[in-house]
Amino acid sequence: MGLVVLVLAACAHRDRIVVGSKNFTESDLLGEIVAQQIERRTGLAVARRFHLGGTFVCHQAITAGQIDLYVEYTGTAYTAVLKHAPVADRDSVYRVVASDYAQRFGLVWGKPLGFNNTFAITVRRRDAAHYGLRRVSDLARVAPRWKAGFGYEFLERADGFRGLASVYGLRFAAPPIAMDLGLTYRALAEGKVDVIAGNSTDGQIQALDLMVLEDDRRYFPPYEAAPVTRQATLARHDGLAAALGQLTGRISDAEMRRLNALADVEHRDIATVARDWLRSNLP
Amino acid sequence: MSLWDFYARNAGEVLGLVGQHLSLVASSTAIAMVVGVPGGILLTRRPAWRAPVLGLANVFQTIPSLALFGFLIPLPLIGGIGATTAIVALVVYGLLPIVRNTYAGIAGVDPAVREAGRGMGMTDWQLLTQVELPLGLGVILAGVRVATVVSVGTATIAAAIGAGGLGVYIFRGVAVVDDTLILAGALPAALMALAADALFGLAERRFAWRAK
């Protein structure tokens, strides 16, 4: 009896695709879109392991075979996982990431979904109007009197704060306050800090009346989102690659911001947002 | 880089973060005691309040820390970003074991002993300070012990609101996929929790003896 249960469990696991996501709304949304797309196009059962604790946890989970795929960003894989020095060229980043992942981890990068979720140096809109800020270079003028609040990832990463400060000559009154990324938006809106580094596709930017400064010196590397899948999983399921391929280039920056706002600002259910998007874009 | 190399190279920073962590734990546990012990005593005098107060303390435990920080940021005095907000959150999480054990410690005193005290003409205050608190001390200390040990672990979330502490290494490590950094924060926190547990264990045994 125990043996039967064990065998059944093993079979169930083989025919099931486990989709993961990182611990923020956009990743959950993309995970859900991918999951529903697989369910619709291949008929395979999909298990969701969403909101895992960031890049580190997702990477450990997929290399250990705990999940079969998740949506990753090229720039994140390039600098945070592969530890390369940041590069601003989109195509070369994608090429390096795809070949390194295949060789080192047995993971396959699908084609990018379309949008680029880069770091977004963000200020309050009224400050931008008052001080005439449009580009990140404009920030150098006011920085000595301003307080910055950044997430740990931005403070630590090679393509994060240190490089930004030296490229743009930013000197703040005090070292930036290190805090949770999600809380930086609240802190900015409440006037506790004056500048943060959000993500360019975050729905909060519009909702809280904030403004993204243009990266006029092209400092930030590309962060194109694409599904990363275990080679073994793709080999086992024929239709899987084709189903994922249909999503290629379908989500623009503006579209992603809109979907994020639906979930974050209007508090719509993520599964519903994903289903509606799939219905109207891939009928 | 190995963990020991990391500590050797960043000794000053490590000590600073350990200090921040200790002060977060010490101040929040002290405040939780100042609020929680009288609170627990009050519940023994007002039995009707017991269920709602303990229920509320229970609910506090379930609020996710980031959500709690989100609520606290806009508030004056107890909010904003930095150590104050972190301490307020840690106090909120530390109240339950202290209030509950203080109540249990005093409520658990043998009614016959209490009656004997009253028979001797003790006032309520004398009864509390000379009979109930000494007899309940072991249980009350056990509550403080749990609150402190839990607080050592929970204080790592202070790093999410710019308050520093050992959580800084854990948050950094998670952000950049670096096991050494995560360990650099988690290991001293674990040792600190064990040390606090051992220390309070000793105190508890001592006072429980005296009560017998």
Image (cartoon, coloured by chain):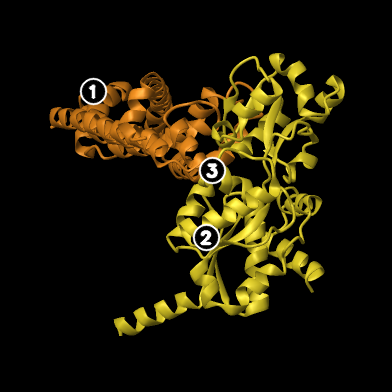
Mark 2: which secondary structure?
helix
Q: Which residue is mark 3?
A: A80
- Residue B108, position in %: x, y? 26, 40
- Amino acid at pointer 3: Ala
Q: Are marks 3 and 1 in contact (CB under 8 Å)?
A: no
Residue occupying the point 43% across, 25% down: B24
Rendered image quadrant of residue A161: top right
Separation of marks 3 and 1 at Cα, in angstroms: 61 Å
Counting labels gives 3
Q: Which chain is orange?
A: B
Mark 1: which secondary structure?
helix
- Amino acid at pointer 1: Gln
- In the figure, A97 relative to B2: above or below? below
Camera-near label (3 vs 1) is: 3
Separation of marks 2 and 3 at Cα, in angstroms: 17 Å
Q: Which residue is mark 1?
A: B130
- Residue A193, position in %: x, y? 67, 24
| Quadrant for the N terminus of chain A in the image | bottom left
Q: Which chain is yellow?
A: A
Q: Which residue is mark 2?
A: A102
Asked whether the viewer can see residue A122, the reply is yes
Asked whether the viewer can see residue B98, the reply is no
- Amino acid at pointer 2: Ala
| Chain containing mark 2 | A
Q: Residue A77: which disc?
A: none
Rendered image quadrant of residue B68: top right
| Quadrant for the C terminus of chain A in the image | bottom right
Residue B80 or B127: which is nearer the viewer? B80
